[in-house]
Image: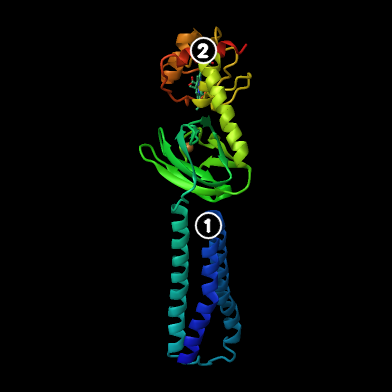
Amino acid sequence: MQRIVLGVISALFVLLTPLTAFAQEKLHDPAAGWYSHFNLWLIISIVIYLVVTIPLIYFPFKYRRKKTNQDGAYIQGNTALEILWIVIPIIITLLLGVQSWALFTEYRTVPKDAFEAKSVAFMYGFEMTSPEGITTMNELRVPVGPVKMNLTSKDVIHDFAIPHFRVREDMLPGRTTYLWFNAKKPGEYPVFCSFYCGTGHSGMLAKVIVMEKNDYDEWVKKQKGASEAAAASPELMGKELLDKSGCTGCHSITGEVKMGPSLKGILGKKTILADDSTVTVDEAFIKEKITNPEAKRIKGFPPVMPPTQLKPGESEAISAYLKTLK
Ligand code: HEC
Ligand SMILES: [Cu+2]
Protein backbone atom coordinates (compact mmCIF):
# COMPACT_ATOMS: atom_id res chain seq x y z
CA MET A 1 0.00 0.00 0.00
CA GLN A 2 2.78 2.41 0.96
CA ARG A 3 4.37 1.74 -2.37
CA ILE A 4 1.25 2.82 -4.21
CA VAL A 5 1.08 6.04 -2.20
CA LEU A 6 4.72 6.85 -2.85
CA GLY A 7 4.28 5.95 -6.50
CA VAL A 8 1.34 8.33 -6.94
CA ILE A 9 3.15 11.17 -5.17
CA SER A 10 6.28 10.88 -7.26
CA ALA A 11 4.22 10.57 -10.44
CA LEU A 12 2.43 13.81 -9.55
CA PHE A 13 5.71 15.61 -9.01
CA VAL A 14 7.08 14.38 -12.32
CA LEU A 15 3.89 15.53 -14.05
CA LEU A 16 3.62 18.92 -12.43
CA THR A 17 7.22 20.12 -12.28
CA PRO A 18 7.51 20.81 -16.04
CA LEU A 19 4.25 22.76 -15.86
CA THR A 20 5.63 25.23 -13.32
CA ALA A 21 8.92 25.45 -15.18
CA PHE A 22 6.99 26.14 -18.36
CA ALA A 23 4.98 28.86 -16.64
CA GLN A 24 8.12 30.39 -15.15
CA GLU A 25 9.75 30.66 -18.52
CA LYS A 26 6.81 32.52 -20.04
CA LEU A 27 6.49 34.93 -17.12
CA HIS A 28 8.44 37.75 -18.76
CA ASP A 29 5.10 39.12 -19.78
CA PRO A 30 2.44 39.26 -17.03
CA ALA A 31 -0.34 38.77 -19.59
CA ALA A 32 1.25 35.57 -20.92
CA GLY A 33 1.96 34.41 -17.35
CA TRP A 34 -1.69 34.97 -16.63
CA TYR A 35 -2.68 32.61 -19.47
CA SER A 36 -0.55 29.71 -18.22
CA HIS A 37 -1.74 30.40 -14.70
CA PHE A 38 -5.36 30.30 -15.83
CA ASN A 39 -4.82 27.12 -17.84
CA LEU A 40 -3.17 25.33 -14.92
CA TRP A 41 -6.08 26.21 -12.61
CA LEU A 42 -8.52 25.15 -15.30
CA ILE A 43 -6.88 21.73 -15.82
CA ILE A 44 -6.65 21.03 -12.09
CA SER A 45 -10.26 22.12 -11.55
CA ILE A 46 -11.52 19.88 -14.35
CA VAL A 47 -9.59 16.88 -12.98
CA ILE A 48 -10.94 17.43 -9.45
CA TYR A 49 -14.43 17.89 -10.83
CA LEU A 50 -14.25 14.58 -12.72
CA VAL A 51 -12.69 12.69 -9.80
CA VAL A 52 -15.63 13.75 -7.63
CA THR A 53 -18.49 13.66 -10.12
CA ILE A 54 -17.87 10.37 -11.92
CA PRO A 55 -17.94 8.22 -8.72
CA LEU A 56 -20.85 10.34 -7.45
CA ILE A 57 -22.96 9.23 -10.41
CA TYR A 58 -21.55 5.71 -10.73
CA PHE A 59 -21.56 4.53 -7.10
CA PRO A 60 -25.31 4.86 -6.38
CA PHE A 61 -25.95 2.41 -9.23
CA LYS A 62 -23.11 0.04 -8.44
CA TYR A 63 -23.71 -0.15 -4.68
CA ARG A 64 -27.47 0.20 -4.59
CA ARG A 65 -29.56 -2.19 -2.42
CA LYS A 66 -30.39 -5.21 -4.54
CA LYS A 67 -32.53 -7.24 -2.05
CA THR A 68 -34.81 -6.01 0.69
CA ASN A 69 -33.18 -6.26 4.15
CA GLN A 70 -29.74 -6.37 2.57
CA ASP A 71 -26.96 -5.34 4.97
CA GLY A 72 -24.42 -2.81 3.79
CA ALA A 73 -20.72 -3.68 3.90
CA TYR A 74 -18.99 -2.68 7.15
CA ILE A 75 -16.10 -0.41 6.14
CA GLN A 76 -13.79 0.91 8.83
CA GLY A 77 -11.49 3.13 6.83
CA ASN A 78 -8.65 2.90 4.44
CA THR A 79 -5.31 4.33 5.57
CA ALA A 80 -3.81 4.50 2.12
CA LEU A 81 -6.78 6.38 0.70
CA GLU A 82 -6.76 8.81 3.59
CA ILE A 83 -3.09 9.56 3.15
CA LEU A 84 -3.68 10.06 -0.56
CA TRP A 85 -6.47 12.56 -0.15
CA ILE A 86 -4.44 14.51 2.32
CA VAL A 87 -1.18 14.47 0.40
CA ILE A 88 -2.52 15.17 -3.09
CA PRO A 89 -4.46 18.32 -2.14
CA ILE A 90 -1.39 19.56 -0.21
CA ILE A 91 0.73 19.15 -3.31
CA ILE A 92 -1.85 20.86 -5.51
CA THR A 93 -2.29 23.77 -3.09
CA LEU A 94 1.47 24.24 -2.74
CA LEU A 95 1.89 24.15 -6.49
CA LEU A 96 -0.84 26.75 -7.08
CA GLY A 97 0.54 28.84 -4.23
CA VAL A 98 4.05 28.87 -5.69
CA GLN A 99 2.66 29.64 -9.13
CA SER A 100 0.51 32.49 -7.84
CA TRP A 101 3.42 33.96 -5.94
CA ALA A 102 5.64 33.80 -9.02
CA LEU A 103 3.00 35.53 -11.13
CA PHE A 104 2.33 38.15 -8.45
CA THR A 105 6.06 38.89 -8.25
CA GLU A 106 6.15 39.27 -12.03
CA TYR A 107 3.28 41.74 -11.89
CA ARG A 108 5.04 43.79 -9.22
CA THR A 109 8.59 43.69 -10.64
CA VAL A 110 9.03 46.26 -13.37
CA PRO A 111 11.76 45.56 -15.96
CA LYS A 112 14.62 48.06 -15.66
CA ASP A 113 14.36 49.43 -19.19
CA ALA A 114 10.61 50.13 -18.97
CA PHE A 115 9.12 53.25 -20.54
CA GLU A 116 7.68 55.26 -17.64
CA ALA A 117 4.48 57.25 -18.05
CA LYS A 118 2.00 58.72 -15.59
CA SER A 119 -1.76 58.94 -15.35
CA VAL A 120 -3.85 61.10 -13.03
CA ALA A 121 -7.53 60.18 -12.87
CA PHE A 122 -10.27 62.73 -12.26
CA MET A 123 -14.04 62.75 -12.42
CA TYR A 124 -14.31 61.74 -15.33
CA GLY A 125 -11.22 61.05 -17.35
CA PHE A 126 -7.53 60.16 -17.36
CA GLU A 127 -4.78 62.72 -17.76
CA MET A 128 -1.70 61.04 -19.20
CA THR A 129 1.85 62.38 -19.08
CA SER A 130 4.65 60.95 -21.19
CA PRO A 131 8.26 60.80 -19.90
CA GLU A 132 9.00 63.80 -22.15
CA GLY A 133 6.37 65.80 -20.23
CA ILE A 134 3.69 65.76 -22.95
CA THR A 135 0.22 65.75 -21.40
CA THR A 136 -2.73 64.23 -23.22
CA MET A 137 -6.30 63.43 -22.28
CA ASN A 138 -7.69 59.91 -22.32
CA GLU A 139 -5.00 58.85 -24.74
CA LEU A 140 -1.54 57.51 -23.98
CA ARG A 141 1.06 56.88 -26.64
CA VAL A 142 3.85 54.41 -25.89
CA PRO A 143 6.58 52.75 -27.93
CA VAL A 144 6.62 48.94 -28.24
CA GLY A 145 8.11 47.30 -25.11
CA PRO A 146 7.55 47.20 -21.36
CA VAL A 147 5.63 50.19 -19.97
CA LYS A 148 5.39 51.29 -16.34
CA MET A 149 2.45 53.50 -15.36
CA ASN A 150 2.52 55.59 -12.20
CA LEU A 151 -1.04 56.18 -11.10
CA THR A 152 -2.83 58.60 -8.83
CA SER A 153 -6.13 60.46 -8.59
CA LYS A 154 -7.22 64.07 -8.15
CA ASP A 155 -10.51 63.35 -6.39
CA VAL A 156 -12.00 59.94 -5.60
CA ILE A 157 -10.81 56.36 -6.10
CA HIS A 158 -10.61 55.27 -9.74
CA ASP A 159 -8.99 52.21 -11.29
CA PHE A 160 -6.78 51.97 -14.34
CA ALA A 161 -7.64 48.79 -16.26
CA ILE A 162 -6.33 47.58 -19.63
CA PRO A 163 -8.08 44.26 -20.32
CA HIS A 164 -5.84 43.37 -23.31
CA PHE A 165 -2.76 43.46 -21.10
CA ARG A 166 -4.48 41.73 -18.16
CA VAL A 167 -3.64 44.57 -15.77
CA ARG A 168 -5.59 46.83 -13.46
CA GLU A 169 -4.66 48.94 -10.46
CA ASP A 170 -6.55 51.33 -8.20
CA MET A 171 -5.84 55.06 -8.51
CA LEU A 172 -5.98 56.66 -5.07
CA PRO A 173 -6.01 60.34 -4.16
CA GLY A 174 -2.84 61.25 -2.27
CA ARG A 175 -0.98 58.08 -3.12
CA THR A 176 0.95 56.83 -6.14
CA THR A 177 0.44 53.25 -7.24
CA TYR A 178 1.84 51.53 -10.33
CA LEU A 179 1.39 48.75 -12.80
CA TRP A 180 3.38 47.53 -15.79
CA PHE A 181 2.58 45.72 -18.99
CA ASN A 182 4.41 44.49 -22.03
CA ALA A 183 3.15 46.33 -25.11
CA LYS A 184 4.31 43.90 -27.75
CA LYS A 185 2.28 44.85 -30.82
CA PRO A 186 1.44 48.30 -32.20
CA GLY A 187 -2.26 49.02 -31.99
CA GLU A 188 -4.97 50.63 -29.87
CA TYR A 189 -5.97 49.12 -26.56
CA PRO A 190 -8.98 50.39 -24.58
CA VAL A 191 -8.54 51.60 -21.00
CA PHE A 192 -11.44 51.55 -18.55
CA CYS A 193 -12.03 52.94 -15.10
CA SER A 194 -12.99 49.84 -13.16
CA PHE A 195 -13.87 51.36 -9.83
CA TYR A 196 -17.34 52.86 -9.63
CA CYS A 197 -16.59 56.53 -9.06
CA GLY A 198 -19.77 58.50 -9.83
CA THR A 199 -22.34 59.34 -12.50
CA GLY A 200 -19.75 59.74 -15.26
CA HIS A 201 -17.97 56.45 -14.47
CA SER A 202 -19.14 54.64 -17.60
CA GLY A 203 -17.81 57.51 -19.71
CA MET A 204 -14.26 57.13 -18.35
CA LEU A 205 -12.88 55.57 -21.48
CA ALA A 206 -9.36 56.02 -22.73
CA LYS A 207 -6.89 54.19 -24.90
CA VAL A 208 -3.26 53.16 -25.00
CA ILE A 209 -1.79 53.58 -28.46
CA VAL A 210 1.25 51.37 -28.96
CA MET A 211 3.57 52.63 -31.69
CA GLU A 212 6.83 51.54 -33.29
CA LYS A 213 9.73 53.33 -31.58
CA ASN A 214 10.51 55.68 -34.50
CA ASP A 215 6.83 56.58 -35.00
CA TYR A 216 6.72 57.44 -31.33
CA ASP A 217 9.84 59.65 -31.54
CA GLU A 218 8.33 61.45 -34.48
CA TRP A 219 5.12 62.05 -32.55
CA VAL A 220 7.12 63.50 -29.63
CA LYS A 221 8.92 65.90 -31.98
CA LYS A 222 5.64 67.05 -33.51
CA GLN A 223 4.03 67.62 -30.08
CA LYS A 224 6.98 69.73 -28.95
CA GLY A 225 6.72 71.83 -32.10
CA ALA A 226 3.00 72.28 -31.50
CA SER A 227 3.43 73.53 -27.93
CA GLU A 228 6.09 76.04 -29.03
CA ALA A 229 3.65 77.41 -31.60
CA ALA A 230 0.95 77.51 -28.93
CA ALA A 231 3.12 79.60 -26.60
CA ALA A 232 3.21 82.28 -29.29
CA SER A 233 -0.57 82.44 -29.80
CA PRO A 234 -3.29 82.59 -27.13
CA GLU A 235 -5.82 80.90 -29.44
CA LEU A 236 -3.56 77.89 -29.94
CA MET A 237 -2.73 77.82 -26.24
CA GLY A 238 -6.46 77.88 -25.47
CA LYS A 239 -7.09 74.96 -27.80
CA GLU A 240 -4.30 73.00 -26.16
CA LEU A 241 -5.60 73.85 -22.67
CA LEU A 242 -9.06 72.62 -23.62
CA ASP A 243 -7.58 69.22 -24.57
CA LYS A 244 -5.12 69.09 -21.70
CA SER A 245 -7.60 70.03 -18.98
CA GLY A 246 -10.05 67.36 -20.04
CA CYS A 247 -12.74 69.80 -21.22
CA THR A 248 -13.04 68.09 -24.61
CA GLY A 249 -13.93 64.82 -22.87
CA CYS A 250 -17.30 66.39 -21.94
CA HIS A 251 -17.65 69.27 -24.41
CA SER A 252 -17.56 69.14 -28.18
CA ILE A 253 -16.51 72.11 -30.28
CA THR A 254 -18.72 71.04 -33.16
CA GLY A 255 -22.22 71.66 -31.78
CA GLU A 256 -22.74 68.07 -30.69
CA VAL A 257 -23.99 67.67 -27.08
CA LYS A 258 -21.84 65.25 -25.08
CA MET A 259 -21.85 65.05 -21.28
CA GLY A 260 -22.06 68.86 -21.29
CA PRO A 261 -23.25 71.49 -23.81
CA SER A 262 -21.16 72.14 -26.92
CA LEU A 263 -18.72 75.05 -26.65
CA LYS A 264 -19.26 76.09 -30.26
CA GLY A 265 -20.30 79.74 -30.55
CA ILE A 266 -20.69 79.96 -26.78
CA LEU A 267 -19.41 83.54 -26.28
CA GLY A 268 -22.23 86.05 -26.40
CA LYS A 269 -24.84 83.28 -26.21
CA LYS A 270 -27.63 83.47 -23.60
CA THR A 271 -27.68 80.48 -21.32
CA ILE A 272 -30.34 79.34 -18.83
CA LEU A 273 -29.16 78.42 -15.35
CA ALA A 274 -30.58 75.71 -13.10
CA ASP A 275 -32.58 78.37 -11.18
CA ASP A 276 -34.20 79.50 -14.49
CA SER A 277 -32.34 82.83 -14.57
CA THR A 278 -30.58 83.81 -17.78
CA VAL A 279 -26.97 84.95 -18.19
CA THR A 280 -25.00 86.04 -21.22
CA VAL A 281 -21.81 84.04 -21.61
CA ASP A 282 -18.76 86.31 -21.47
CA GLU A 283 -15.13 85.88 -20.45
CA ALA A 284 -15.88 86.41 -16.76
CA PHE A 285 -18.62 83.76 -16.85
CA ILE A 286 -16.28 81.27 -18.52
CA LYS A 287 -13.58 81.94 -15.94
CA GLU A 288 -16.03 81.42 -13.09
CA LYS A 289 -17.47 78.31 -14.75
CA ILE A 290 -14.00 76.74 -15.00
CA THR A 291 -12.74 77.57 -11.51
CA ASN A 292 -16.04 77.27 -9.64
CA PRO A 293 -18.59 75.37 -11.75
CA GLU A 294 -20.80 74.84 -8.64
CA ALA A 295 -21.75 78.52 -8.59
CA LYS A 296 -23.78 78.60 -11.81
CA ARG A 297 -25.07 75.26 -13.04
CA ILE A 298 -26.62 75.11 -16.51
CA LYS A 299 -30.21 73.89 -16.74
CA GLY A 300 -30.84 70.49 -18.30
CA PHE A 301 -27.42 68.92 -17.59
CA PRO A 302 -26.13 66.75 -14.72
CA PRO A 303 -24.06 68.85 -12.25
CA VAL A 304 -20.84 66.94 -12.92
CA MET A 305 -18.41 69.56 -14.24
CA PRO A 306 -15.35 69.52 -11.94
CA PRO A 307 -13.46 72.70 -10.96
CA THR A 308 -10.11 73.27 -12.71
CA GLN A 309 -7.32 75.40 -11.28
CA LEU A 310 -5.97 77.83 -13.88
CA LYS A 311 -2.75 79.78 -14.10
CA PRO A 312 -2.94 83.52 -14.89
CA GLY A 313 -3.76 84.06 -18.55
CA GLU A 314 -5.09 80.58 -19.15
CA SER A 315 -8.76 81.46 -18.88
CA GLU A 316 -8.19 84.37 -21.31
CA ALA A 317 -6.48 81.96 -23.72
CA ILE A 318 -9.44 79.56 -23.52
CA SER A 319 -11.87 82.42 -24.19
CA ALA A 320 -9.71 83.59 -27.09
CA TYR A 321 -9.92 80.12 -28.60
CA LEU A 322 -13.66 79.76 -27.91
CA LYS A 323 -14.21 83.07 -29.79
CA THR A 324 -12.77 81.45 -32.91
CA LEU A 325 -15.43 78.72 -32.81
CA LYS A 326 -18.25 80.34 -34.71
C1 HEC B 1 -17.02 65.87 -16.47
C2 HEC B 1 -17.47 66.60 -17.60
C3 HEC B 1 -17.00 68.02 -17.77
C4 HEC B 1 -15.72 68.52 -17.83
C5 HEC B 1 -14.42 67.74 -17.66
C6 HEC B 1 -15.84 69.92 -18.10
N1 HEC B 1 -17.16 70.27 -18.18
FE1 HEC B 1 -17.88 72.11 -18.62
N2 HEC B 1 -19.76 71.44 -18.29
C7 HEC B 1 -20.13 70.14 -18.04
C8 HEC B 1 -21.56 70.05 -17.83
C9 HEC B 1 -22.33 68.80 -17.55
C10 HEC B 1 -22.05 71.37 -17.95
C11 HEC B 1 -23.49 71.83 -17.76
C12 HEC B 1 -23.87 71.65 -16.31
C13 HEC B 1 -23.09 72.56 -15.42
O1 HEC B 1 -23.23 73.77 -15.55
O2 HEC B 1 -22.33 72.06 -14.57
C14 HEC B 1 -20.90 72.22 -18.26
C15 HEC B 1 -20.97 73.59 -18.50
C16 HEC B 1 -19.92 74.35 -19.03
C17 HEC B 1 -20.03 75.70 -19.54
C18 HEC B 1 -21.30 76.50 -19.66
C19 HEC B 1 -21.92 76.11 -20.97
C20 HEC B 1 -23.16 76.90 -21.34
O3 HEC B 1 -23.91 76.39 -22.19
O4 HEC B 1 -23.34 78.00 -20.80
C21 HEC B 1 -18.79 76.08 -19.94
C22 HEC B 1 -18.38 77.42 -20.57
C23 HEC B 1 -17.90 74.99 -19.67
N3 HEC B 1 -18.62 73.94 -19.12
C24 HEC B 1 -16.54 74.98 -19.93
C25 HEC B 1 -15.67 73.98 -19.57
C26 HEC B 1 -14.24 74.07 -19.66
C27 HEC B 1 -13.47 75.24 -20.23
C28 HEC B 1 -13.74 72.91 -19.17
C29 HEC B 1 -12.29 72.52 -19.01
C30 HEC B 1 -11.50 73.35 -18.11
C31 HEC B 1 -14.87 72.07 -18.78
N4 HEC B 1 -16.01 72.75 -19.02
C32 HEC B 1 -14.76 70.78 -18.26
C33 HEC B 1 -19.28 69.05 -17.98
C34 HEC B 1 -17.90 69.15 -17.98
CU1 LIG C 1 -13.40 56.53 -12.36
Q: Which residue is at 54% across, 41% downward?
A: 192
Q: Any mark on residue 319, and which?
A: 2
Relative vertical location of residue 39 with respect to residue 196 in this rendering, above or below: below
User: How far apart are labels 2 and 1 at the CA level?
Assistant: 49 Å
Quarter of the image for the C terminus: give it: top right
**Residue 299 visible (yes or no):** no
**What is the crowding at mark 2: few (fewer than 14 residues within 10 Å), some, or many (at least 20)?**
many
Q: Which residue is at 57% across, 42% downward?
A: 143
Image location (x, y in percent) of residue 141: 56, 37
Q: Within the image, what quadrant is residue 214 found in?
A: top right
Disc nearer the start of the sequence (2/1): 1
Report the side of 76 relative to 220 (left or right): left
| Disc 2 element | helix
Relative vertical location of residue 165 with respect to residue 276 in this rendering, above or below: below
Q: Nearer the viewer, residue 232 or 66?
A: 232
Q: Any mark on residue 28, and which?
A: 1
Residue at the extreme left of the image, as rendered: 174
